Image (cartoon, rainbow, N blue to C red):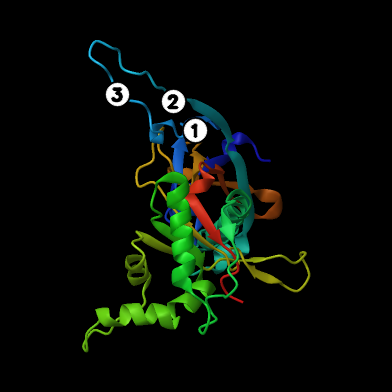
């Protein structure tokens, strides 16, 4: 590690990291970021016993006091673990680049892709284990004869409503699942009448969302390489073939019920938690770029989601 005076936060590269496109990612949209002031702390789980929905005796005779009711709040801890990766920008690469800044941006982009894939995989693993309201319907969505996305969606939506009182407002799935369901004859049949001769109906994410009264269809396409370094790449889809139908609170706060969040700790006010540092390594004849961040993906209320497993064969 170099002397501290040789290490500095690179504002230009940090801004690049913060604005890095996340359109193909699910985690940042399904588990929105909640900035926190401390790396570790607790968050409140409010009214887990659902006292506010209980049928309380609110009758009061003249002169009597009202029946007193109350609710409880428990706490659960979070810990924003540090995540960081670094890479060398060799002097030869800088000298050979058409633009000097581009050499550093390319390496920052490489690091961001790697660190965001890790974050995506962590979120998928968390939800696969944490969302216990789940089923594996017999017929998949790419079975256009017997697959029934309407029955599956109704099951999922009703389950979330039955358990929480919230109507799901988002659905998340891998792009391969999305391509199967958007071409399902039952989906096309419901949407085709919304178009015109000059503007034919298209099964877009927005149209699909409107079909089920959702706010957003989140489609991801992130792959990860599960092979040992040096071996032939073995690519897998991070989110597999499962679909999550969930309630995501539109406004997050201390007493809000929602599927989950990502607690993000910004040690030096880096927006969204990402920080890029750069330092000189004379012995390696280059500059070292490091991307780092602190976050903790957490399931707040698992009942706010339903997991439809194996939606394509």
* One can see residue 3 in this view: yes
Q: Tell me: 232 left or right of 25.
A: right
Vertical order, 39 against 26 (above or below): above
* Mark sitting on residue 240: none
Circle 3 — which element?
loop
The image quadrant that residue 192 belongs to is bottom left
Q: Across the whole image, how many numbered discs are drawn on residues? A: 3
* Mark sitting on residue 49: 1
Q: Earlier in the sequence, mark 3 or mark 2?
A: 3
- Image coords of residue 281 (percent x, y): 65, 49
Q: Residues within 10 Å of mark 3 (few under 14, many from 20)?
A: few
Q: Residues within 10 Å of mark 2 (few under 14, many from 20)?
A: few
Q: Earlier in the sequence, mark 2 or mark 1?
A: 1
Q: Foreground residue, 109 or 119?
A: 119
Circle 1 — which element?
loop
- Image coords of residue 234 (percent x, y): 71, 71
Residue at coordinates 48% horizontally, 36% vertically from top-left? 268
Q: Foreground residue, 300 or 65?
A: 65
Q: Are marks 2 and 1 in contact (CB under 8 Å)?
A: yes
Residue at coordinates 36% horizontally, 65% vertically from top-left? 212
- Identify the residue position indicated by label 3 in the image: 59
Q: Tell me: 15 left or right of 294.
A: left
Vertical order, 296 against 183 (above or below): above
Residue at coordinates 38% horizontally, 28% vertically from top-left? 56
- Identify the residue position indicated by label 2 in the image: 71
Vertical order, 285 against 237 (above or below): above
Which mark is in front, 3 or 2?
A: 3
């Amino acid at each position: 590690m170099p002397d501290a005076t040789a290490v500095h936060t690179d504002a230009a590269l940090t801004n690049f990291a913060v604005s890095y496109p996340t359109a193909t990612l699910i985690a940042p949209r399904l588990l929105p970021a909640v900035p926190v002031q401390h790396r570790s702390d607790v968050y409140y789980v409010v009214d887990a016993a659902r006292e506010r929905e209980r049928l309380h005796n609110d009758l009061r005779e003249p002169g009597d006091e009202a029946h007193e009711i109350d609710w409880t709040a428990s706490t659960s801890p979070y810990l924003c673990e540090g995540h960081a990766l670094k890479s060398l920008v060799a002097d030869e690469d800088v000298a050979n680049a058409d633009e000097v800044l581009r050499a550093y941006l390319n390496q920052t982009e490489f690091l961001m892709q790697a660190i965001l894939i890790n974050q995506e995989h962590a979120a998928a693993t968390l939800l696969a284990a944490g969302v216990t309201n789940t089923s594996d319907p017999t017929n998949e969505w790419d079975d256009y004869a017997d697959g029934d996305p309407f029955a599956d969606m109704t099951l999922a939506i009703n389950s979330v409503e039955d358990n929480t009182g919230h109507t799901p407002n988002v659905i998340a799935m891998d792009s391969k699942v999305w391509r199967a369901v958007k071409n399902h004859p039952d989906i096309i049949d419901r949407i085709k009448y919304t178009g015109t001769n000059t503007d034919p109906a298209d099964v877009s994410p927005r149209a699909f969302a409107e079909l089920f009264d959702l706010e957003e269809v989140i489609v991801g396409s992130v792959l990860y390489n599960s092979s040992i370094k040096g071996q032939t790449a073995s690519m897998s889809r991070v989110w597999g073939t499962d679909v999550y139908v969930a309630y995501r609170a539109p406004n997050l706060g201390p007493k809000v019920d929602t599927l989950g969040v990502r607690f993000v700790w910004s040690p030096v006010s880096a927006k969204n938690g990402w920080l890029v540092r750069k330092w000189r390594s004379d012995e390696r004849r280059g500059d070292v770029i490091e991307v780092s961040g602190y976050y903790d993906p957490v399931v707040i209320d698992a009942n706010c989601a339903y997991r439809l497993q194996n939606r394509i064969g």
